Amino acid sequence: MATTTHEPPKIEEPRDPARLTGNSGNGGGRTLVPAHGDMRAVKDYSPPPASTGIWVVVASITMTFAALTSALIVRQGSALDWRHLDLPRILYLNTVVLFASSIALEVARRQVGAFMGGVRDQVASPARWLYITLFLGLLFVAGQYAAWLQLRSQGLFLATNPNSSFFYVLTALHAVHVLGGLGGLTRVIRRLNRSILRKSTLDATSRYWHFMDVLWVYLLLLLWMKL
Amino acid sequence: MHDMSAHVTQHAPPTSFIRKHIFSLDHKVIGKQYYGMALLAAVAGMFLSWLMRIHLGWTNYAIPGLELLSKNGAPGNVMTPEFYLQLMTMHATIMVFFVLTTAPFAAFGNYFLPIQVGAEDMPFPHFNMMSFWVTFAGFLVLMSSFFVPDGPTLGGWTQYAPLSAVGKVSGPGQGTGVILWATSITLFCVGQLLGALNFITTTLDMRTRGMSMWRLPLSAWGWFITSCMGLTAFAVLMPACILLILDHVAGTSFFVPANLVINDQLQPHSGGSTLLWQHLFWFFGHPEVYIAIVPGMGMVSHVLITNMRKPMLSHRVLVYSMGALAVLSYMVYGHHMFVSGMNPVSSLAFSFPTLVITIPSTILVLIWLGSLYGAKLRINTASLFALGFVSMFISGGVSGFFLAQPSTDIMLHATYFVVGHFHMVMGVAAMFGIFAGTYFWFPKMFGRMMNETLGKLHFWLSFVGAYCIFMPFHYLGLAGNVRRYQAFVNDYTLRLIPVHRFITVAALCTGAAQLIFLYNLIHSRFWGEPATDNPWQGTSLEWSTPTTPPPHNNFGDKLPEVFHDPYQYGVEGSTGDYVMQTSPEQIKGAIDEA
């Protein structure tokens, strides 16, 4: 069996504290000067744009789903055609799968962190847990698709009633965002394999992925209470 | 092995034509692309307004060649009522989204925000490139609706449900036209969200050493505050447009109520809420007004200070006021819905913050006027347009007091009074901000000066012309002239036709004056007098670049370090009455806000 060996990168010195204090700005660029002139130095030489950026993305997605929530509440209040909808059971299993993927990603993050810190593991690729996360993420999307098929078999389509409309819209939009996260994970794996992964990229991706969990739990509760 | 010890830029300078000029990652090229698109859109939008104005002044006049634009909409070159409404919708959509949002915010912000904070680029250049191309795709989708059989939508830029959600039965263009409109706006929202992501992270994380938030120039503050608004507003409009598309193509009933009969046809929908669309739309729509104007406020302040040679009365209060406008803009959106049948208590609730929002607006005006008082303002085209901005903002803003109160708004809401109000305060003022920015930063963007004589001629014709067009709108509104009508044939509106004709002539002349600007822009780009690095003796970082236009990574080998507040004018510096932000020299008596 072929094994992938990764040589641990050099440990980078902490960023210049003078740049981080107070309001003094943080250097203007992403300061892509790797430590000791070595591009394999994958420690966090990237300053905060990735982590700030991910909160900006989270804020934007939150607004989108807040708008849809208000739409659901207004639509429910204004209508006589609101019917109860039994949520497909598979959604609960999907929830477990999504949570499992988050746990796998956390394990991966620690392993990659240790790897970056110089703890050497010649046999196990630190990407292994990332692949598991990717698989579980895909399984979640497949599970959501199975849920849509179940509704379809009951004759509940997008336009059948407002409940099914909101179910499809909310779950599909969430799935699209999960697919975006899977794209991000793929990018992380590619960069890790090329030893050019920045820790901030991994951290930002994992934050996004965990946010998908939180969002899904919120949506599940909303759908469970309102539909 | 490569020597990586030298400074590494985020992305290497492009070598191929495509990477350099088309799919560029460079924020400066993307800024210019946005500007070019906005210019194209402005020409298209203005042309449509000419056609509408001619029709309003001389109804049923055959406009030569109109048939080319739409065979069904202009048989014998005479505009049909439906085609008038289609032109109105397209004029507004093009102008609001693709000119007033893209030019002051996306174009100038892209070009100058990273430079003003002292960065080599935005942190996510690929997203930045996508931002432009997705927006441009949105523009093409919108314009493509002229080429579908029924033409573009006629539902107005607000696309009120249910008529926007039921398809062809509600009029030509209400089928495919609305779908294209909603698709275009969805793409636009995606593009602007990607832009906002870059703007916010650039401001928060990419500032150079010494550049505190309070050392940011006011223009940078304007773009930052606007990007925060864009982030939340476009994130709401996008799902609203998706729901609208679904009502069309999937037969859902989000916005169409039950038992709705249109043109004697019962609609196959059930239980949707028509007010829901208005709530979602205006939650975006009112912040959008400020998305259009706040960058202008920042840019105009920047231009005025540079030409006054002294800072504003209070840098901080000006920033706080722009921030207050942004926060309040979300609380006032219901004032667009006073006549929608909304609960009167809600009207009262929305009326109060609407009156409150006049406070930061007034503070801004007082700071501008107070700072101008006693200043020896350098009169050039940029400063004239900045003054024009302030003038338009005041004139347009004053009519807002009347519209803020439900009791008077019910009278005025559907009249030309509102048209006059928003054109002055949002349309012309924002356009003047764009012009001020163009004349001011053109030398930095292209390395050549614009012609000042032509510029001043352009200003005076535009300034007088804009007042001639939009002040009479208020009079028309007070006289009861309803808006959105394609012709005026009642006894009382017939008497107002001479006013409409006057406005039409003014609009044609003012529009023609913009050709002077276009000529000046193109001529100066290639044959203008070469510009120095700092032609206006400015202090902020865009005037510290090693070359003009700035190099690929903005500052060459070394990023600048900032030592001062942005506006150290009227001091004794080694170079004259100002000290650059990058100059380490001590300034006597300077109060550093940072």
Image (tube, coloured by chain):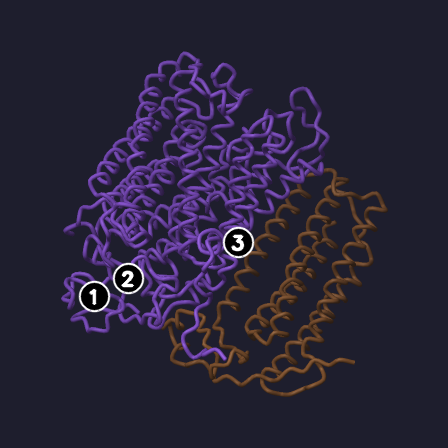
Q: Chain of mark 3?
A: B
Is B3 left or right of B82, judged from the image as shown? left
Is A113 left or right of B490, judged from the image as shown? right
- Which dot, 2 or 3, sits closer to the camera? 3
x and y percentages locating residue B97 in the rendered image? 47, 42
Name the residue beneath numbered marker 1: B579
Output the letter for the chain in purple. Answer: B
Output the letter for the chain in brown. Answer: A
Q: Residue furthest bottom?
A: A119
Name the residue beneath numbered marker 2: B540
Q: Is the residue at mark 1 from the same chain as the one at mark 2?
A: yes
Dividing the picture into quadrants, the one containing residue B476 is: top left
- Residue at 46% x, 67% y: name it: B10
Q: Is residue B16 above or below residue B490?
A: below
Q: Chain of mark 2?
A: B
Could you tell me how far apart the alpha carbons at marks 2 and 3 are, in whole angstroms? 29 Å
Dividing the picture into quadrants, the one containing residue B393 is: top left
Amino acid of disc 2: Ser
